[in-house]
Amino acid sequence: MSEQSDHETPRELAGLEVDPALFRGLTGRRTSRRGFMQAGAGAAGALGLSSILAACGVAGTKANSKKAASFDWEAWWKKQKPTKQLIFANWPYYIDTSNNGKDHPSLDMFTKATGINVSYKEVIQNNAPFYAQIAPVLQAGQATGYDIIVITNGWQLTQLLENAWIVPVWMEKVPNFQKYASASVKDPTYNPQSKYGLVWQSGFTGIGYNPKLTGREITSVNDLWDPKFKGHIGMMSDNTELGSIGLLKLGINPPTSNQSDWNKARDILNQQKPLVRQYYDQSYIDALQNGDIWISQAWSGDIYQANLKGYKDLKFVIPDQGVMYWHDNMLIPLHATNPLSALSWMNFYYTPKIAGIVADWVNYITPVPGAQQYVADVIKDSAVANSPLVFPTQADYAKAHDYYTFKNYNDFSNWNNTFNPIIQS
Amino acid sequence: MLNLPNWAYLGFFFVIPLISVLALSVSRGNPEIGYSYTWPLHWGEFSDAIRTYHVQLVRSFWYGIASTVFTLAIAYPVAYWIAFYGGRNKSTYLFLVLLPFFVSYIIRTLAWQFILSDQGIVLGHLKDWGLLSQNFHILSTSWAVIWGLTYNSIPFYVLPLYVAIERIDRRVVRAANDLYANTTWTFLKVILPLSVTGIFAGFLLTFVTNVGDYVNQQVLGGTGTYMIGSVIQDSFFTNQDYPMASALSSILMLLLLVCIWLYARTFGSEAIQDYA
């Protein structure tokens, strides 16, 4: 090191003496860091606050239905021109597939027959998130990008209809519907006269169980309350399914139920709670397969597919008190670019041949009873053709109940507030 | 002024969404009639939220604390071992810790549903050997949820801890040995206090995410394990009750901030500043 003594700053060495106070004043910050942070936070907060006040309140969707009531749909349909495209949004595993999931024979046949190219998108995982995805788009008056969407009957479907975001079906172009559709799907409570959409597939929500573990046959909804199965009972976490089975146990028909009925259903479901192992979403089927639960609320198609996978012990039963009958519906959203293609597909689907091809794959309840003959004779798949899970008998249909259709948001909110605490606590 | 991009980013992605959530929680209405504000502001939603969901809030914090403690108990030895005894293969070991994260979160959690199933590879054999009763089950209990949370948080705790422990000057450890400290004393008096910043960083990552978790409960939990994260998700998506969902989110954020502040206070605020 050098021979400099102590600390001599370079400035002193060079002989430039500066008054330290002046030096500080010249080089110090204009504002302190703390002051800047406070100012920044204040500005950002003011920005946020002004954004609220500027957009004070958010408009509701009810206004839409008033506007749409007087719309002349007949004239609108007549103005539509045929196109060569169809964009079809659906749930996964809900159509026939071949070639490792890359092709869909029914769609290919449709393209060959009509020349319309189908873009099939399996983008719907659940009703609520999908509704949350398309609602802002429709509210802004824009196209969703889909010509057909498949929505289960429930609050989201009711909301779509309430908000007038669905194009009514022009029945003249879908004569096959009147000809081939099952009586049980022609006039559903949530969609009178099938005005706004046609059923794609349906299903039963009944009871699935493993007779080897339960030790006996199951015939009644009361078996889900059997203390012998304590800790091995599964129920659904969807509160419409849960509430409906509670109503069925009490012998109440869900579409005509009211708040006091719901309260009674809530009470017996709370009584069942100590016996229930878990409130499942679709994963009850894994638990049934593993043997974690012995008996559960179940969807008919899931049990059928579990049997195909090798779990032949599992059985589906339609209880004495009745079974819930749900429908997934093909709807045409507002501002769809190819509405006539959508009608064309619906008409093409509602035939024994195409419905049979799809039914052979999907194994849920098809809306075309004639498909059973087709599956038995032409596809020669007797397992599917004879299965009551895919083609229920008249006796089964007699026990089928529809779900409660919500009249408005407050209705829906009341249902939620009644049944959510059972699942959530 | 060079900080302006920072402030813009913070303002746009943090402050405005925060204010919007708070604003929505004081609004009233539903999707049909729209949302509007009343003056004075309607704070009733917050008290409603706490009154209806206090059980789930407390439960989520309990699961958060339990899973954080368990994660620390597992992550600390791992991080310590890699830092002190990893030698040349430290990055390999860290990679192995991170490897499960190449698989999606939900699949990792579902894997535990398979492993811990009643007659599965773990419980099935233990039951066959008569070590457990036939009715014993781990799935559908709160311990399964806590384990799921713990498992998914381990890498988040191992990495900050590893960084903190790695930074400890080895000469300090040797000095402790020179001063007649045995391994336990060295650990308690030298290594542990120096790694507190890592513990705090891991705590932030683990506790905050676990309290708001909504996946583990659905897959591994049973009745009576519902967490506040699922409640918020239900409120938002299924019930479309946006004021309630916003109120719950705001309450959760506030409670988490309080917890973090308490933690920092207890373990010395110099820990945060040191890490920052």
Image (cartoon, coloured by chain):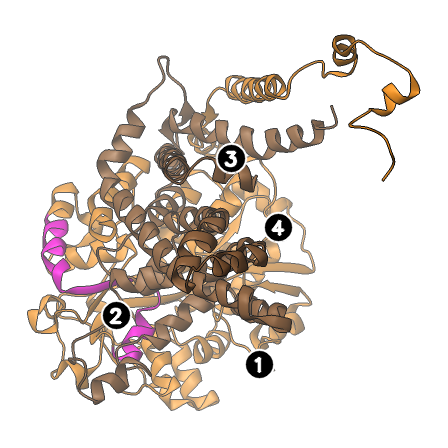
Chain colours: A orange, B brown
Question: Which residue range is magenta in the image?
Answer: A264-291
Q: Nearer the viewer, residue A196 or A325?
A: A325
Residue position for label 2: B138
In percent of width and height, residue A25 lies at 75, 10
Name of the residue lying farthest toward the right: A14
Residue position for label 4: A145
Chain letter for the residue marked with disc 4 in the picture = A
In percent of width and height, residue B24 lies at 43, 28
Decide: few, some or many residues near mark 1? Use Cα within 10 Å; few <14, some 14-19, many ≥20: few
Chain letter for the residue marked with disc 3 in the picture = A
Q: Amino acid at mark 4?
A: Gly
Numbered label attached to residue A71: 3
Chain letter for the residue marked with disc 2 in the picture = B
Q: Between marks 4 and 1, how big is the CA–CA gap?
A: 26 Å
Q: Between marks 3 and 4, how big is the CA–CA gap?
A: 22 Å
Residue mark closest to the camera, 3 vs 1: 1
Q: Amino acid at mark 2?
A: Ile
Residue position for label 1: A98
Q: Between marks 2 and 4, how big is the CA–CA gap?
A: 45 Å
Residue mark closest to the camera, 2 vs 3: 2
Is residue A43 placed above or below B262 in the rendered structure? above
Q: Amino acid at mark 1?
A: Ser
**Both marks 3 and 1 on one chain:** yes
In percent of width and height, residue A245 lies at 19, 59
The C terminus of chain B sits in image quarter: top right
